[in-house]
Image (spheres, grey):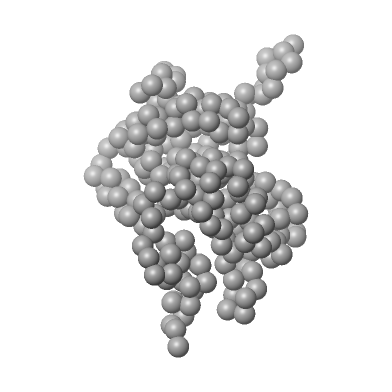
Amino acid sequence: AASGGAAKRALGQDPAASEEARGGKPAKDVAHVWVKRMATSVSAADLKALFRPYGKVVVAVINKKEGGQSIGVGYVTYASLEDARRAALAMDGKVGPFVAPGVEGGLSVTLARRRQDASQAAQASAAGGSPVMIYVKNLGGDATEAALKALFETYGTVLKAVIQKKAPKAGSSGAARICGFVLFANKNDASLAVSSAHGMAVNGTTLSVGLYDSKGATSGAA
């Protein structure tokens, strides 16, 4: 009989582990997003259809109890990391019939960091360096701090992510301005995030990302 740990891996409790249980190593060019607080009626096909608008979905998996019943948690594997980031930012906090009854705050969608990425991030943080903040402009109105953190944490160790909304000027008919701030453990991680995410298209808008200091935001082309 399979051990409890092996059974959990086979049931898809962890994206990387479940791929190993199927007889292969996780592909380096794919990325996963965790999806939590789902209604137990959501099937793998439903989950795939729900996340397909954000990129090429390789597979969608619903985690289940040993009896086969959904536990309301699953993951979606995308063909590219950029698609996974876009999905996490767009879907975190979404409400609808796919959310578990009685749950507040909508879906919980976060980018699943690969084991080796987490290890490398920990080593980079231990190597020292002062925290550095970046700004992120042109976020959508439904962006959440959890989704913002998920979007940027694969670039390095994120200490904090904050979203600020500024009301339009008096007499203006424009919408509120939404800006995010992400604090990285060191400058190398922050610079990588700026160079990678500046100009990224998310939900029909183009992100403007740059280093931030006490004097204000700098150019996004860091």
Residue sitting at x 49%, y 30%: 200
Q: In which quarter of the image is the C terminus?
A: top left
Query: Where in the figure is residue 198, as x and y percent of width and height?
Result: 44, 27
Query: Where in the figure is residue 144, as x and y percent of width and height?
Result: 59, 40
Look at the image and tell me whether residue 146 can be seen: no
Residue that lies at the very extreme toward the bottom in this rendered image: 1
Query: Where in the figure is residue 115, as x and y percent of width and height?
Result: 36, 57
Q: In this view, does 109 lie above or below 215?
A: below
Q: In this view, does 193 lie above or below 17?
A: above
* Of residues 27 and 71, the one drawn nearer to the viewer in this rendering: 27
Q: Is residue 220 above or below residue 124?
A: above
* Of residues 124 and 69, the one drawn nearer to the viewer in this rendering: 69
Look at the image and tell me whether residue 93 can be seen: yes
Residue that lies at the very extreme toward the left in this rendered image: 127
Residue sitting at x 74%, y 15%: 173
Q: In this view, does 176 lie above or below 170?
A: below
Residue sitting at x 54%, y 50%: 57
Q: In which quarter of the image is residue 128?
A: top left
Query: From the viewer's perspective, is 42 left or right of 159?
Result: right
Residue that lies at the very extreme toward the top in this rendered image: 171
Query: Where in the figure is residue 46, as x and y percent of width and height?
Result: 67, 57
* Tag count: 0
* Of residues 88 and 22, the one drawn nearer to the viewer in this rendering: 22
Q: Quadrant of residue 69?
A: bottom right
Residue sitting at x 48%, y 77%: 7
Q: Quadrant of the N terminus?
A: bottom left
* Of residues 115 and 189, the one drawn nearer to the viewer in this rendering: 115
